[in-house]
Image: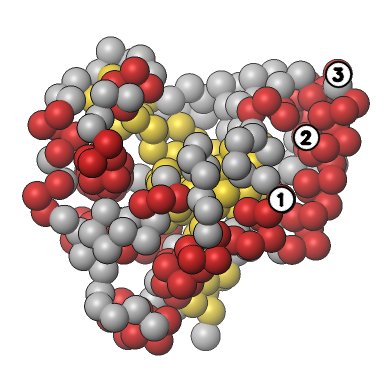
Amino acid sequence: MKNEDPNGMERPSLCGLGRVLASAGAAEPPQSAPADASLSNVLFPDLATAFQPIVDVTQGCRVFAHEALLRTRAGGAAGAVLCRVPGNDRYAFDHACRVRAIETAVRLGLPARLSLNVLPGGVCAPLHGVHGALGAALTAGFPLDRIIFEITEHEQALDHAGLLPTLAVCRAAGAFVALDDFGAGYAGLNALVEIRPDIIKLDTNLIREIDADRARQAVVGAAVQACRAMDIFPIAEGIETAEEARTLRAMGIELMQGFLFARPALERLPPVRTDAVAGADRE
């Protein structure tokens, strides 16, 4: 029997996670790595989790999910810090940041889904991959069917097919799989076909000034058509103007993210501009 999601998505009812994993072919229940949970604090104590909402513009900008983002406590982007993480600790650090995001979401009483970024090379890691994040969510008491794993292809995943068994475990547990930055870097058509995500996030460079750019409109329009054919939900990210949002809504996109609606907020859930796109509930 299936539970219907408030936004129309469906996922299997949750039973004991061990049974879910066994039916999906996983050898053991997911575990988190306790020693790594504080790794991000140890290496970089000035880092914090920020949250930015993804909204459904057809429902008065109701929050569909919050993406967890890594920031410095001063509010700056964490890129300069991340490049200093030792290569051997990269996936452990990435996992520690997800654990921190889950624990912060529970502390804040996050009411919607939680979207967590994960590098493709770390997806299948026994302790530092998505299994570890599922285990951390269980420990923290965060519902697994409210987790979205965003595969951020900033590095090349040579074997998308190799990810499929692990992603099947995620879906069996109720979590969603998203392909981030679609249309940029390695996140292209091959990944769309091979991973078959539940969600794609259209890259910011495709969205910028789309209201005045016919080439961008053509590319995004084709992506939306492909999503409809494959039962994939598209999210447009990086939206800064009402004109961009109205154009995207006219193309059939309902889920949006960007400064137009709310900026990321450190260790709290930011208020959403519910009047950001007047008339967006109609195509």
Q: Which mark is residue 248?
A: 2
Residue at x-position 79% and y-position 48%: 224
Q: CA distance from mark 2 to mark 3?
A: 12 Å
Quadrant for residue 38, please give it: top left
Mark 3 residue type: Ala
Q: Is residue 176 left or right of residue 274?
A: left
Q: Residue 30 bears which disc, if any?
A: none
- Say what secondary structure mark 2 lies in: helix
Q: Residue at x 84, y 45 (%)?
A: 222
Q: Check disc 2: other Cα within 10 Å, few if <14, some if 14-19, many if 20+.
A: many
For the question of whether residue 254 can be seen, the reply is: yes
Instruction: Name the residue at 55% across, 66% down.
Output: 161
Q: CA distance from mark 3 to mark 1?
A: 25 Å
Select label 3 or label 1 by which is in front: 1
Q: What is the x, y in percent for residue 235? A: 64, 43
Residue 200: x %, y % from top left: 63, 48
Residue receiving disc 1: 189
Q: Secondary structure at mark 3?
A: helix
| Amino acid at the residue labelled 2 | Leu
Q: Which residue is mark 3?
A: 212
